[in-house]
Amino acid sequence: MTGLDGLLAHLPSWSTEPEVLARAALDRSGAVPDGLPLAVVHATSVDDVVRTVSYAAEHGVPVVPRGAGSGVSAGALAGTGTIVLDLSRLDRIVEIRPDDGIAVVEPGVITADLDRAAAEHGLRYAPDPASAAFSTIGGNIATNAGGLRCVKYGVTRDSVLALDVVTGDGRLLRTGRTTLKGVTGYDLTSLLVGSEGTLGVVVGATVKLLPLPRSTATATAYFPDARTAVEAVTGLRRAGLRPSTIEFLDHATLVAIDDAQGGDLSTRGRAFLLVQTDGYGAEEEMAAVVEALKATATLVETSGDAAAADRLLATRRQALPSIERLGRVLIEDIVVPTTRLADAVAAIEAIVRDTGVRIFTFAHAGDGNLHPIVLVEEDGPPVGDAVDALFALALDLGGTLTGEHGVGLLKRDWLAAELGETGLDLQRRIKAVFDPAGVLNPGKAITER
Amino acid sequence: MTGLDGLLAHLPSWSTEPEVLARAALDRSGAVPDGLPLAVVHATSVDDVVRTVSYAAEHGVPVVPRGAGSGVSAGALAGTGTIVLDLSRLDRIVEIRPDDGIAVVEPGVITADLDRAAAEHGLRYAPDPASAAFSTIGGNIATNAGGLRCVKYGVTRDSVLALDVVTGDGRLLRTGRTTLKGVTGYDLTSLLVGSEGTLGVVVGATVKLLPLPRSTATATAYFPDARTAVEAVTGLRRAGLRPSTIEFLDHATLVAIDDAQGGDLSTRGRAFLLVQTDGYGAEEEMAAVVEALKATATLVETSGDAAAADRLLATRRQALPSIERLGRVLIEDIVVPTTRLADAVAAIEAIVRDTGVRIFTFAHAGDGNLHPIVLVEEDGPPVGDAVDALFALALDLGGTLTGEHGVGLLKRDWLAAELGETGLDLQRRIKAVFDPAGVLNPGKAITER
């Protein structure tokens, strides 16, 4: 511990108090670590990060980078013998350059705060994960967070132009550029986005901002069953439409929201879609959306005014908290080709029937990204088989284990099945290039040999 | 040579004829190799690629992958002792899945052919490099090609979902996924796009297709000088507009086009912008574009019908061929923040004055991507200083050496200045992970130690 004391003596803010450590060891996954970290370092500068990582590399101590701790795959879970590197105090919006459409931020900036700051310039930060109100840009970058608008505007990776990172050997690396385009060198920026803190610690980012859309139109549609609802997504594509949001809620989720909020959504249909269009021509495009939805929906409503649309979006964002009221949950995040969504919801219904496990499914349906929320009931059936069946169906349908939450600790066992041995081997070697001592968030995102 | 004969005996199509080798050694850069390759292999299957690369790795023979040979940075230049691996016969569009919005292609597919095939399903392949009519998807992936529409729809990397590549040790690697979203593992797909054949040989790709826009509107504007024209790009941004194309031509380029085509563009103004909007609301957005342009343009014309718009785009695409009629050219490709475009065109005008070298500049102005075309005149001044000055101004203005053409051989000397030593070191180590024997297009894209 003399060594660690030597590090801490050079840092302005840290703690080794058990209660602080216990909190800093957890994220929103519900997973439980094997013990307490050694210390939590609250970085107040890039230099603090360099010092901490350099110490860790020299002494072989694992470092667990942490933003808001809002991850749901246990990517920020910190066990015995680790140092938690908390980046949440690096929270300055350094610069917004509206005429270039870029912002320079520190990793601890809350995503919604950046979006609000951009809005003062008539701009927005496109990625809008459901956690935007409390998750950080650094965490969003670590997991390549998605959100509701990414069906039209892309995921976090599509908005990140440049990164400042501290690599596993304590070097400061600048990747990318502040221009909107460029091909000099390999794309290390995209490689780092989604790497869950295993290749480098993000200490700064330059991100794209887009003009706020001139107008936004919103429709809600109710369907006789889940299959019909998700099949409507293909109908929208066939009509050549490009909605900015296509969200699906199944009946169990509608009931959970109603129970939590006192509404009556679940009485209007067995499945629900929320569709938005935006930009020039949003109203005209919405008219075409409504026409397409009416082919199979039992009820379609449009809401002209922005306040009503915001209420609908808020309802959608209440899906997960409403389910979480019922008990501990496992938040899954599989993706399938959109044409296989109907097969996916049918398979999930079969898993519910076969295992007796309660699953609530909502989805960023335009991307094929399903969030089956598995309820872990104390006196209910064990959920392991149901979760395995969800992963198996994702791969069976030509999909992927995780769309926007990351692998973390919780999805590691399925990694080889998706990536293949050659892919996994190359990924491990890349990890060794950036983090030769293997101290950056070890065991997360990719499995060791 | 016995070893090489042993390889060729197992391959269905190859040549060692000097005339064939001489042609296969060149690309569109105008650069001259130091001698003849050993052989050109015309791959007819993935197995041919695996065999060739495995042989090369075993015997330490450099392999130069090649599509249409339309690159302009000498990325496909093949010198003495190399094997040219020609992928142009792997040219099948394997599958178009319109309802999923994806296509599966072999690398030798001509980009415009894919776009045409997609159009039969009401879709399009968004990247549209000026070379689309003759360049291949594989080559576009190697350089991360851009084009006219990428200001709104992104570059090649943004359209590539999954790749099949043969790595430098002859292993077949599948990266990415066929879903629209996914974060399982590091993003090897983005890493490979733009790597100029130095990390792997692309033998297959799954790409995104977008709906054909419902309508497209086009305007042309003439300005009193280049500065005023490129400053109008910032005006469009301030108005919250998202054109699908913003192309700039300077006066020298307008004169070259007029000389080649017998037109009178150069009499209408000293600088020119071509702006398109598309999708729902294209006409309404174009009205706002025109209003913004009129603030500083001396003449603004809109063309309602598609045929007229196509003629305008064709004129733009004639810029480079029209300049090439005047002699050998160096095609530069720098990018600056869009707010620095005015400084960039002023600096280029100063370079012309100071060096006496003739430079024609056109630009994907919405991206800040300038193509200064440097004329190499036999009895003119030497161009070296002018080219160095272009690279220096790109970096001085916070920009990059290459926006969409790649580093190839021609921009290597400036690489460290842009990437920094840490970045370059990590890139070299990544190269060694994918290509331990160092046989894939050595010397291109990144410099060796």
Image: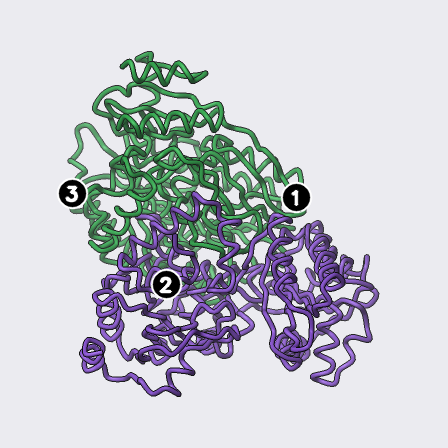
Chain colours: A green, B purple
Residue under the image location 81 percent in, 58 percent down: B296
Image position of A414 (left or right of B25) = left
User: Closer to the camera: disc 3 or disc 1?
Assistant: 1
Residue under the image location 24 percent in, 65 percent down: B57
Name the residue type under label 2: Pro
Quarter of the picture holding the N terminus of chain A: top left
In the structure shown, which secondary structural element does the residue marked by tag 3 occupy?
helix
Host chain of mark 1:
A
Q: Quadrant of residue B385?
A: bottom right
User: Closer to the camera: disc 2 or disc 1?
Assistant: 2
Residue B442 is tagged as: 2
Q: CA distance from mark 3 to mark 2?
A: 49 Å
Residue under the image location 44 percent in, 16 percent down: A13
Name the residue type under label 1: Pro
Camera-nearest residue between A430 and B436:
B436
Image position of B265 (left or right of A148) = right
Host chain of mark 2:
B
Q: Which residue is mark 3?
A: A385
